[in-house]
């Protein structure tokens, strides 16, 4: 059976051939969670690779829980699990619905759209500053979503480098280039998502919330502090966990989507030329970029009871991992799925999830992609200037090096 667990596999390339074999022969397949580097083996999980099955799992929280074991493939430490479950990403309805209702008002279209011009100016300045040659992630797309998210949240300019540090700590822990390994007294690696490793981040979130109570502004953190439904507000812990989620997911989703979209265009020169000639196709092209290169590769759920999925019995307590990147290339759903079609319609990809956990920041991500690619398409034709490099991760579809010239 193909190994689609090992993060080092994804560092080389998305294993599309292996995922296609699984879709065709074993759409719900058992994966051994073997030892990788310093990280010990786990109990294993079911990999779900077909579009319809992935969508079903994401839309069935009563059967496939986000809370029982959280949402990452690697099991959290048992002592950390109660804390991790306080994040909306790791909740099930009705608790998840209560929190989502509380915070939805913070992400109004008016609040997001007022950043559009600034984001486009920022993208233009970063690309112009590159002078015709750059490593896109390092010189442009690591910085762009970080600045945009900081504006949205209301993080002071002097504190913005902290957001990148925290993101790299949490997202890049499997990658030798980004990982800062901390071990416990017995020499075992400490999970970077553990409360102990994130105490500085949660402390900062608490301080920022207090500042917004004293000095409210038109930003998301102020809106979260003031959010109220039926007399109920977010607790301090819920505020801190939302800050964590917005910083990590809000930053890294776009940080992965931008170079991923550029690389996709350069690998499809006919589509790139067409899009330069027909910029009105940009909205549908962005959806196609998200389909072909979804920012998130996988998400984990846990079976709440004995189940059968695509004919495969699944026991209560088993880990069930959905592969967004495989679902988005499922021939049963997308005609000619390995062809990049900037005018593809319909395009019901699963890059931002499905069901109760549909990404709350999807509109802001699309806005940033629209602003960036408007400026990118205005450049002279761009070419690769060396080898690209991928993040070592079975979670984030990251591009860490993308040398370009124009």
Image (cartoon, rainbow, N blue to C red):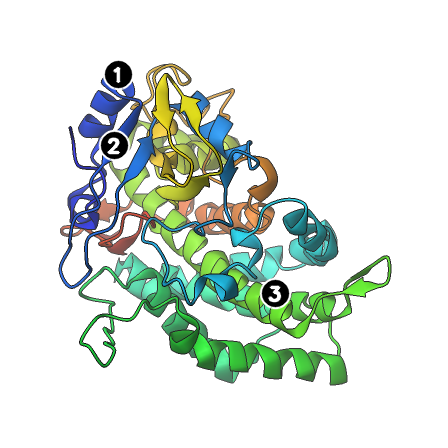
* Residue 319 image position (x, y, % from top left): 36, 41
1 or 2: tag closer to the N-terminus: 1
1 or 3: tag closer to the N-terminus: 1
Q: What residue appears at the point 45 percent right and 61 percent down from the top-left corner? A: 81
Q: Is residue 117 left or right of residue 308?
A: right
2 or 3: tag closer to the N-terminus: 2
Q: Nearer the viewer, residue 188 or 58?
A: 188
- Label at residue 349: none
Identify the element where label 2 is drawn.
Answer: strand
* Residue 146 image position (x, y, % from top left): 46, 66
- Label at residue 152: 3
Say whether residue 310 is visible: yes
Say whether residue 279 is visible: no
* Residue 341 image position (x, y, % from top left): 38, 24
Identify the element where label 1 is drawn.
Answer: helix
Q: Nearer the viewer, residue 248 or 258?
A: 248
Identify the element where label 3 is drawn.
Answer: helix
Q: Is residue 205 above or below residue 220?
A: below
Q: Is residue 275 above or below residue 244?
A: above
Determine which residue is flagged by label 2.
Answer: 30
Quarter of the N terminus within the rendering: top left
Q: Nearer the viewer, residue 45 or 126?
A: 45
Q: 10 Å neighbourhood of mark 3: few (<14), some, or many (≥20)?
A: many
Q: Is residue 9 above or below residue 171?
A: above
Q: 10 Å neighbourhood of mark 2: few (<14), some, or many (≥20)?
A: some
Whether label 2 touches label 3, CB < 8 Å:
no
Determine which residue is flagged by label 1.
Answer: 24
Q: What residue appears at the point 15 percent right and 64 percent down from the top-left corner? A: 38
In three-dimensional space, the C-alpha distance between marks 1 and 3, rounded to whole angstroms, equals 43 Å
Q: Nearer the viewer, residue 46 or 269?
A: 46
Q: 10 Å neighbourhood of mark 1: few (<14), some, or many (≥20)?
A: some
Q: Which circle, 1 or 2, is nearer the viewer?
A: 2
């Amino acid at each position: 059976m193909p190994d689609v667990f090992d993060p080092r596999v994804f560092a080389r390339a998305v294993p599309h051939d292996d995922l296609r074999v699984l879709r065709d022969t074993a759409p719900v397949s058992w994966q051994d969670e073997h030892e990788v580097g310093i990280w010990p083996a786990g109990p294993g999980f079911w990999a779900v690779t077909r579009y319809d099955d992935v969508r079903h799992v994401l839309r069935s929280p009563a059967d496939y829980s986000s809370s029982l074991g959280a949402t990452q493939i690697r099991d959290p430490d048992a002592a950390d699990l109660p804390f991790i479950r306080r994040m909306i990403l790791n909740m099930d309805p009705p608790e998840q619905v209560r929190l989502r209702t509380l915070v939805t008002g913070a992400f109004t279209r008016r609040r997001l759209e007022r950043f559009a011009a600034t984001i486009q100016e920022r993208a233009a300045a970063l690309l112009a500053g590159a002078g015709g040659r750059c490593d896109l992630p390092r010189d442009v797309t690591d910085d762009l979503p970080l600045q945009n998210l900081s504006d949205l949240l209301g993080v002071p300019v002097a504190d913005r480098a902290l957001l990148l540090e925290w993101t790299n700590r949490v997202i890049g822990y499997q990658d030798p280039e980004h990982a800062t390994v901390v071990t416990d007294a017995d020499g075992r690696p400490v999970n970077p998502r553990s409360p102990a490793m994130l105490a500085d981040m949660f402390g900062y979130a608490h301080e920022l919330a207090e500042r917004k109570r004293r000095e409210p502004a038109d930003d998301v953190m102020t809106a979260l502090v003031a959010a109220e439904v039926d007399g109920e507000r977010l607790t301090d812990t819920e505020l801190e966990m939302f800050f964590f989620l917005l910083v990590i997911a809000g930053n890294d989703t776009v940080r992965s989507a931008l170079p991923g979209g550029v690389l996709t265009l350069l690998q499809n020169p006919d589509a790139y030329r067409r899009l330069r000639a027909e910029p009105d196709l940009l909205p549908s092209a962005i959806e196609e970029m998200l389909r072909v290169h979804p920012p998130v590769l996988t998400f984990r759920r846990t079976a709440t009871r004995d189940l059968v999925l695509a004919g495969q019995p699944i026991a209560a307590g088993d880990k069930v991992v959905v592969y967004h990147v495989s679902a988005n290339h499922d021939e049963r759903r997308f005609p000619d799925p390995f062809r990049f079609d900037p005018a593809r319609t319909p395009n019901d990809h699963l890059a931002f999830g499905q069901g109760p956990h549909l990404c709350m920041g999807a509109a802001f991500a699309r806005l940033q992609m629209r602003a960036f690619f408007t400026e990118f398409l205005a450049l002279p034709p761009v070419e690769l200037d060396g080898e690209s490099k991928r993040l070592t991760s079975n979670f984030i579809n990251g591009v860490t090096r993308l040398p370009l010239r124009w």
